[in-house]
């Protein structure tokens, strides 16, 4: 195996190919109106469901910073959750590309190796961005009031999207490593559901049993949700001992760590994948 | 002699412990021909195509394509090949033009070059009129053609087609054949796998019969047919005159004529083709026997295929190959 030096020419080729494939993947979203519609309605519906089903029961358990409104607690959490859910399609897309022989074609072309995965993850990031902004808009319309300044709000969205992007590389690895299309669906849910549910996304973790609480408080999605709440609502949203900066740094560290492990891993799996 | 465009030398590919998909396969492919890889399911054809197209590494052996080692210079090989797999690897939601331009960009063409080259290729392939329709509205044959267009946009020296006409209706198949033949006229070398003997027969200049990961036989279609034993002369003669006819034909060929129940005719090997036919008719005429029907047949590639991939080797011109096929491929018979 040869190690190829990164020259400006190779880099520019990789960027061009990534742009070409990002466009291809985004067009797939835009040109399938049913998919586009459902994939945007679904996260908003979920948000409304949690808001109105859980809301009343939970409001009394919320810290004062939420001002007795569940929506103020829920929105930062749901943005974190959506960013993670938004990574799922990376797995489905790549799995489908392999099943239909598209990956074979790409691998037979004189292409930058990273472009297929980068093009896929960037397209999914773009779609996630649109969905998060839509959720945020609906949230504000329904009464979400962030307490910090606009920069805090923007920083929160950015942290969520960065984390979601890192998760896309986990999904890329899964999507290429698991061959069966139905199995991949199950695999994605197996990873995504426990992590988003056993977290502070919907509820404060302190009512959970001790052992579960330990997991819930330390797993990355909780940390991302904490960072978002800190950035959007302020210090009052965090339990004593946590700081906004601390949680944000921790969220960024998780993002970087996931990328550092799964980006090279998925490229490795990609190079070996044959339909 | 011109250097072959593809050299495969002693290639072994294992999957897991037990499966040897390729078992020491060697062959060379000259430039500018259509080369058919023919063999039953699981023979190793697709595995070979994947190794040639740099998708799979071989476990042993050396493979060179267009002057480069597929392992050490995979990038250089990829710049010179095109691959159309068993499924048309194109995007349904994109138009024919968008699909082709995209692959052009991935071959390294500039936006402008990709655009002009795409127009040229679509024109040539006969899809320019539907170029701006989404591929999901295309027929199966059109999908295959746009898949070919996507390969051609990069001006490959070597084009790999894995079962290019599988699942395509007969009319579209003929169009595809026409197209593939045109490509070779332009200097491209085409390597295709097929399970259809008819396809290999019509299309390929040279054929390699692959069986169980090994090379069964190799040569021009004509050479392969000749190797199976020349032409067959069939004479339909009224039952009552069989004995007399066989007697009168005794001196025409070295092997005596015999009655073939399956074909309902007397058959004899026509070693000298039409000359044998003429002599046979003269002999019958002398004996005052008039055949009701006469046929001089080349052995079909079907016959060759059955002979080379596990069917009985003792099949001679006097016995129908169909009967051999009916008894099933003889397990364990040596073929290579």
Image (cartoon, coloured by chain):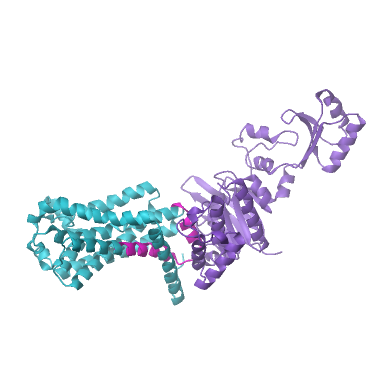
Q: Going by the picture, which residue comes out furthest to the bottom? A: A8
Task: Indicate left or right for B192 with B313 as reference.
Answer: left
Highlighted magenta segment, given as a residue range: A99-128
Q: Name the residue: 57% across, 55% down.
A: B161
Q: Position of residue B132 (x, y in %)?
A: 51, 61
A205 or A43: nearer the viewer: A43
Residue A267 shows in this picture: no
Task: Indicate left or right for B1 with A190 as reference.
Answer: right
Chain (purple): B
Q: Position of residue B314 (x, y in %)?
A: 70, 36
Q: Colour of chain A?
A: cyan
Whether residue A47 is in magenta: the answer is: no
Task: Indicate left or right for B300 with A246 as reference.
Answer: right
Q: Name the residue: 67% across, 58% down.
A: B33
Q: Going by the picture, which residue comes out furthest to the right? A: B286
The overriding secondary structure of the stretch rendered in magenta is helix
Pick the quarter of the image with the N terminus of chain B.
Answer: bottom right
B208 or A77: nearer the viewer: A77
A27 or B246: nearer the viewer: A27
Q: Name the residue: 85% across, 40% down.
A: B276
């Amino acid at each position: 195996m040869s190690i190829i030096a990164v020259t400006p020419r190779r880099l520019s080729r990789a960027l061009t190919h990534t742009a070409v494939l990002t466009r291809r993947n985004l067009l797939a979203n835009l040109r399938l109106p049913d998919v586009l519609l459902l994939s945007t309605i679904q996260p908003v519906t979920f948000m409304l469901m949690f808001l109105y089903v859980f809301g009343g029961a939970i409001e009394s358990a919320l810290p004062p910073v939420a001002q007795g409104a569940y929506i103020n607690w829920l929105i930062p959490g749901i943005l974190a959750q959506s960013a993670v859910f938004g990574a799922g399609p990376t797995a489905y897309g790549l799995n489908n590309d392999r099943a239909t022989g598209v990956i074979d074609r790409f691998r037979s072309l004189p292409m930058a190796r990273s472009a297929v995965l980068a093009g896929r993850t960037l397209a999914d990031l773009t779609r996630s961005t649109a969905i998060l902004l839509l959720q945020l808009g609906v949230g504000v319309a329904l009464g979400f009031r962030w307490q910090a300044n606009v920069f805090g709000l923007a920083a929160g969205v950015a942290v969520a999207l960065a984390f979601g992007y890192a998760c896309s590389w986990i999904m890329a690895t899964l999507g290429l490593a698991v061959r069966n299309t139905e199995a991949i669906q199950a695999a994605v849910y197996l990873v995504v559901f426990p992590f988003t549910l056993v977290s502070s996304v919907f509820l404060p973790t302190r009512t959970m049993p001790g052992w579960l609480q330990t997991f819930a408080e330390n797993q990355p999605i909780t940390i991302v949700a904490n960072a978002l709440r800190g950035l959007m609502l302020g210090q009052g949203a965090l339990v004593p001992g946590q700081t906004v900066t601390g949680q944000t740094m921790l969220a960024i560290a998780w993002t970087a760590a996931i990328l550092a492990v799964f980006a090279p891993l998925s490229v490795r799996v990609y190079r070996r994948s044959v339909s | 002699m011109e250097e072959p465009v593809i050299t495969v030398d002693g290639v072994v590919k294992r999957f897991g412990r037990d499966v040897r998909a390729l078992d020491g396969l060697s062959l060379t492919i000259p430039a500018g021909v259509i080369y058919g890889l023919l063999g039953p399911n699981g023979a190793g054809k697709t595995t070979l195509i994947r190794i040639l197209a740099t998708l799979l590494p071989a476990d042993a052996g050396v493979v060179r394509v267009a002057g480069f080692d597929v392992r050490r210079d995979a990038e250089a090989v990829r710049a010179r090949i095109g691959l159309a797999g068993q499924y048309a690897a194109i995007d349904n939601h994109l138009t024919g033009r968008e699909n082709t331009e995209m692959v052009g960009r991935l071959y390294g063409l500039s936006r402008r070059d990709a655009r002009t080259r795409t127009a040229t290729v679509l024109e040539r392939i006969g899809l320019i009129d539907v170029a701006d329709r989404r591929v999901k509205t295309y027929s199966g044959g059109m999908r295959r053609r746009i898949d070919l267009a996507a390969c051609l946009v990069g001006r490959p020296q070597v084009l790999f087609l894995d079962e290019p006409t599988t699942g395509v209706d007969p009319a579209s198949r003929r169009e595809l054949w026409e197209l593939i033949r045109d490509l070779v006229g332009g200097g491209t070398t085409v390597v295709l796998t097929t399970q259809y003997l008819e396809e290999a027969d019509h299309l390929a200049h040279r054929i390699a019969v692959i069986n169980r990961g090994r090379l069964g036989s190799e040569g021009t279609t004509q050479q392969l047919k000749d190797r199976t034993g020349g032409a067959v002369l069939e004479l339909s003669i009224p039952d009552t005159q069989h004995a007399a006819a066989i007697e009168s034909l005794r001196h025409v060929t070295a092997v005596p004529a015999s009655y073939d129940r399956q074909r309902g005719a007397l058959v004899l090997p026509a070693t000298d083709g039409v000359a044998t036919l003429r002599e046979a008719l003269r002999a019958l005429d002398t004996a005052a026997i008039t055949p009701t029907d006469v046929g001089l047949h080349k052995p079909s590639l079907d016959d060759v295929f059955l002979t080379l991939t596990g069917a009985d080797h003792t099949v001679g011109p006097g016995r129908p190959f169909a009967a051999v096929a009916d008894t099933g491929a003889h397990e364990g018979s040596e073929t290579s």
